[in-house]
Amino acid sequence: MRGEPDPMMPVRFVSAADTADREVLVTWSDGSTSRFHNRWLRDNSPGALHPQTQHRVEETSRLDPWLKPDGVTVTADGALHVRWPDGHESTFGSAWLNVHDYSSGARWQPRQAPLTAPLPDLRPALRQRYGRP
């Protein structure tokens, strides 16, 4: 399934949520905070995906860039619940939000170190195959 959480990843639970100008501010059970842009949340709403293909049903370009939720709450199991002006409601589980947390470089991973071993010389094999000197 798309964006499945890593079972070995320690999961923080959403303990509080609030809206700001263009984002939802999430406070986690460990005291850390994350920011999720309103438009990004609406675009990634589980209810806005086709049930079989898991593709978005709505065009991202049609979402209002200044979209703001009518309200945000935290569910009893530590998920983020968002009510949108068009009547749509989204619930994002803590595990999913952890995996997709892009705020404060949370998802940044260092690039893999460059390859240090020399690459094999493939020119002789290519010359033989294509008959070139």
Image: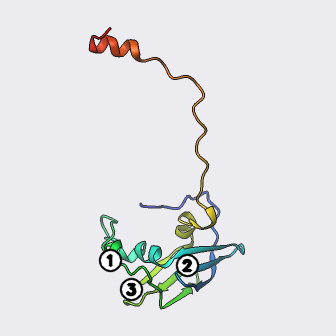
Between disc 1 and disc 2, the foreground one is 1
Residue 129 figure quarter: top left
Say which mark, if any, is on residue 88.
3
Cα separation between marks 3 and 1: 15 Å
Residue 120, percent from left and from top: 49, 19
Mark 1 and mark 2 lie on one chain; the one further toward the N terminus is: 1
The residue to which callout 2 is attached is: 79
Q: Amino acid at mark 2?
A: Ala
Mark 3 and mark 2 lie on one chain; the one further toward the N terminus is: 2
The residue to which callout 1 is attached is: 62
Cα separation between marks 1 and 2: 27 Å
In the image, 131: left or right of 44?
left
Residue 13 figure quarter: bottom right
From what the image shows, is residue 8 above or below residue 78? above
Q: In this rendered view, identify the residue nearer to me: 2 or 76.
A: 2
Residue 62, percent from left and from top: 32, 77
Between disc 3 and disc 1, the foreground one is 1
Mark 2 neighbour density, 10 Å: few (under 14) some (14–19) many (20 or more): many
Q: What residue is at 55 percent from the left and 84 percent from the top?
A: 21
From what the image shows, is residue 111 above or below residue 83? above
Q: What residue is at 40 percent from the left and 15 percent from the top?
A: 123
Q: Secondary structure at mark 2?
A: loop
Residue 14, percent from left and from top: 62, 77
Q: Amino acid at mark 1?
A: Arg
